Image (cartoon, rainbow, N blue to C red):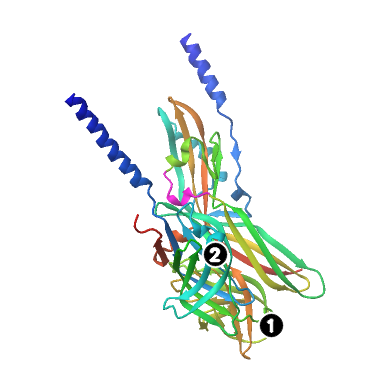
């Protein structure tokens, strides 16, 4: 009977763990994101997961087991084209572009497996205080929304298109983690934190 | 009875100690931080935006209606320009030295000038309606008469990079793609100094900027041609740093708003 109860409990707990799911983050939709050395979470293979999960299999009474793969590894990114304007007329145009971006976040989170997110006020984090267990530097604590204003005055010749790109540098910290409660594993998956450090803008005029 | 009194005194003593520790941990002295920045404007865009980093949740410096006057003053007080405050807006926050500082942008409307006006050792003086006055060091300011934006140089690309060896968050090289160049370039003006340190390579004009102890990320540039004429590359925000306080230690001025706490 005891064995039956144990098996039933194990079955219920295993059903509580969702299969591989991925929480998308804004930085994943960038035109390009290149890590200087190592792999992004989205590039972890099933063999990688298998190897990393072995490092977090040691059961504990309560808390996270963490295996860090990359910490503060430099990344280079190109985001979306901020604006594109073309002059298909016959005379040059004096053009003023003004844009206020109000929801820039310098931190983005991503997770796979059963690691989830929580939102407290305007702060986003991982469930069960994974952020705290990762012992991240103070750079990663600020997730408040920021606003940025872009204003550009320029002359656009006939048959010319103007594009404004954003590119820059950031840092990635990622790895795998498993959460144990009463020696039972209740969460397991990959985590990733992307931090923007510097953003550059590039204006290009293209003959069309 | 004596025992009860003794234990009561012990409990009260430790409670008082605990309360004092609690007060000490929660007392945050209100501070304003400014960063030495080079502000360059052409007078067709006379709006100057100056950031103040404030660690107190509610402070009149964060409220437009609480401000009576704003003026730009030189350190020796010989120059004092009263300016119009258009807006005070929250732009974001940064964690610095275990405190969160909210960045508020003071948007100022400046007068026009017939010739280049430079204010070295500039301070922003703020008089509040409650009678309090502050003066914060902000860096240096240059305002020049505007130049044509379309002349001998028809440019195709505009971007800037930080120099690797620079410890400051500032642009070290401006890259300007060339569609067409009808006159030789002899120099350029970055708002404060004329420089001949540039090169043209593969239809790209590289302007190398001096590495000075000022933040320098958004600015116009004046290109000077061999016939004495000049052209303005428009005001452009080349870079944004999301850890400006962390990276600008030597350039930061700390003002304790209530030093007697």
Q: What's the residue at 41%, 60% (across, down)?
A: B257
Q: Which is nearer the eye, A144 or B162? A: A144
Spot occupied by residue A119 in the image (x, y as percentages of width and height)? 55, 40
The chain letter for the residue carrying disc 2 is: B
**What is the magenta range?**
A135-143
Q: Position of residue B56 (x, y in %)?
A: 45, 53
- Residue carrying label 2: B106
A129 vs B152, nearest the viewer:
A129
Point out residue B176 in the picture as x, y percentages from the top left corner.
61, 74
Which label's residue is closer to the chain start, 2 or 1?
2
Is residue A139 one of those drawn in magenta?
Answer: yes
**Which is nearer the eye, B144 or B260?**
B260
Query: Looking at the image, which residue is at 63% across and 64% down?
Result: A150
> What's the CA distance linking mark 2 and mark 1?
34 Å
> Is there any visible trace of residue A168 in the rendered image?
no
A119 displayed left or right of B139: right
Q: Is residue B133 above or below residue A107?
A: below
Q: Is residue B217 left or right of residue B256?
A: right
Q: Is B56 on the left or on the right of B4, as rendered?
A: right
Q: Residue furthest top?
A: A1
Give the label on residue B151, or none.
1
Write down the chain letter for disc 1. B
Residue at the left extreme? B2
């Amino acid at each position: 009977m005891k064995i039956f109860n144990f098996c039933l409990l194990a079955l219920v707990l295993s059903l509580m763990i969702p299969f591989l799911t991925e929480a998308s983050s804004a930085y994943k939709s960038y035109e390009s994101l290149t890590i200087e050395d190592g792999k992004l979470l989205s590039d972890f293979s099933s063999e990688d997961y298998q190897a990393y999960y072995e490092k977090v299999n040691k059961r504990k009474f309560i808390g996270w087991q963490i295996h860090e793969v990359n910490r503060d590894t430099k990344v280079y990114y190109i985001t979306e084209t901020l604006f594109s304007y073309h002059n298909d007329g016959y005379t040059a145009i004096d053009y003023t572009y003004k844009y206020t971006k109000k929801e820039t976040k310098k931190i983005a989170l991503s997770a796979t497996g059963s690691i989830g997110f929580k939102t407290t006020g305007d702060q986003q984090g991982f469930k069960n205080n994974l952020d705290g267990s990762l012992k991240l530097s103070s750079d990663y604590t600020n997730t408040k929304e920021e606003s940025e204003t872009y204003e550009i005055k320029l002359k656009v010749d006939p048959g010319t298109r103007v594009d404004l790109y954003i590119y820059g540098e950031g840092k990635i910290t990622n790895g795998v983690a498993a959460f144990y409660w009463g020696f039972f594993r209740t969460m397991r998956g990959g985590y990733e934190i992307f931090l923007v450090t510097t953003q550059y803008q590039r204006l290009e005029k293209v003959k069309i | 009875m004596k025992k009860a009194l003794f234990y009561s005194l012990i409990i009260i003593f430790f409670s008082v100690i605990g309360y004092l520790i609690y007060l000490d941990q929660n007392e945050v002295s209100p501070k304003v931080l400014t960063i030495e920045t080079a502000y360059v404007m052409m007078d067709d865009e006379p709006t100057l935006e100056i950031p103040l980093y404030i660690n107190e949740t509610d402070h009149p410096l964060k409220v437009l209606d609480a401000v009576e006057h704003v003026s730009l003053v030189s350190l020796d007080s010989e120059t004092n320009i009263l300016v119009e405050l258009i807006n005070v807006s929250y732009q974001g926050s940064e964690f610095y030295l275990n405190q969160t500082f909210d960045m508020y942008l003071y948007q100022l409307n400046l007068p026009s000038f017939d010739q280049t006006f430079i204010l070295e050792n500039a301070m922003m003086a703020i008089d509040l309606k409650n009678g309090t006055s502050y003066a914060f060091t902000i860096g240096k300011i240059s305002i020049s008469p505007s130049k044509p934006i379309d002349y001998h140089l028809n440019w195709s690309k505009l971007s800037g990079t930080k120099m690797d060896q620079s410890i400051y968050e500032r642009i070290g090289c401006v890259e300007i793609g060339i569609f067409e160049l009808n006159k030789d370039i002899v120099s350029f003006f970055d708002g404060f100094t004329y420089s001949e340190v540039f090169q043209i390579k593969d239809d790209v004009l590289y302007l190398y900027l001096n590495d000075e102890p000022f933040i320098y990320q958004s600015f116009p540039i004046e290109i000077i041609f061999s016939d004495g004429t000049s052209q303005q590359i428009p005001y452009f925000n080349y870079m944004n740093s999301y850890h400006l306080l962390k990276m600008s230690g030597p350039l930061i001025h700390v003002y304790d708003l209530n030093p007697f706490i």
